[in-house]
Image (tube, helix red, strand yellow):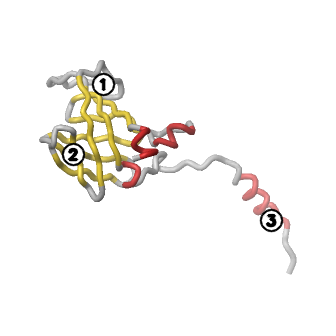
Amino acid sequence: MGVGPASLLAALLLLLSGDRAVRCDTPANCTHLDLLGTWVFQVGSSGSQRDVNCSVMGPPEKKVVVHLQKLDTAYDDLGHSGHFTIIYNQGFEIVLNDYKWFAFFKDVTDFISHLFMQLGTVGIYDLPHLRNKLAMNRRWG
């Protein structure tokens, strides 16, 4: 039995279609180990507004430093302790000092962002927040 023209055409189409970009359901693929270390949350003004745009950071009023350690321990510089969990590979939650912090991982495409796994906007109830992972802790901590 020989290879027919239909088989050759199918193989050619398969090869040509393999050059396309693949889309997936989760652009970020962060792990539990990616969360470990020190995080700095920049906290905006508080209030009970229902029309807050959490994708845009306002001026920060204070900074909250949170340390995440194995297995799920979270603590801040004031001595409060709590816990954290990764949500699939798409986000995380920190419960600390009667606050619940939640964030989705940001879809990033540049090399430096992938290297230090930047996050998107962080929300704590209806307050806008933004975080910056301390690169020093990730490299030498």
Q: Which residue position holds label 2?
A: 75
Sequence-wise first label, 3 or 1: 3
Alpha carbons under labels 2 and 3: distance apart:
63 Å
Alpha carbons under labels 3 and 1: distance apart:
55 Å
Say which element carries label 2.
strand
Q: Position of residue 107 (x, y in %)?
A: 47, 40
Of residue 87 and residue 132, the one placed in the foreground of this image is 132
Say which element carries label 3.
helix
Residue at 47% x, 41% y is: 116
Of residue 39 and residue 94, the one placed in the foreground of this image is 39
Sequence-wise first label, 2 or 3: 3
Residue 52 sits in which quadrant?
Answer: top left
Dot 3 amino acid type: Ala
Alpha carbons under labels 2 and 1: distance apart:
28 Å
Q: Position of residue 132 (x, y in %)?
A: 37, 34
Residue 136 sits in which quadrant?
Answer: top left
- The crowd level at tag 1 (other Cα within 10 Å; few <14, some 14-19, many 20+) is few
Dot 2 amino acid type: Tyr
Q: Look at the image and tell me in which quarter the N terminus lies.
A: bottom right
- The crowd level at tag 2 (other Cα within 10 Å; few <14, some 14-19, many 20+) is many
The numbered mark at residue 106 is none
Residue at 75% x, 52% y is: 16
Outermost residue, bottom side: 1
Above or below 106: residue 3:
below
Q: Which residue position holds label 3?
A: 6
Q: Which residue position holds label 1?
A: 53
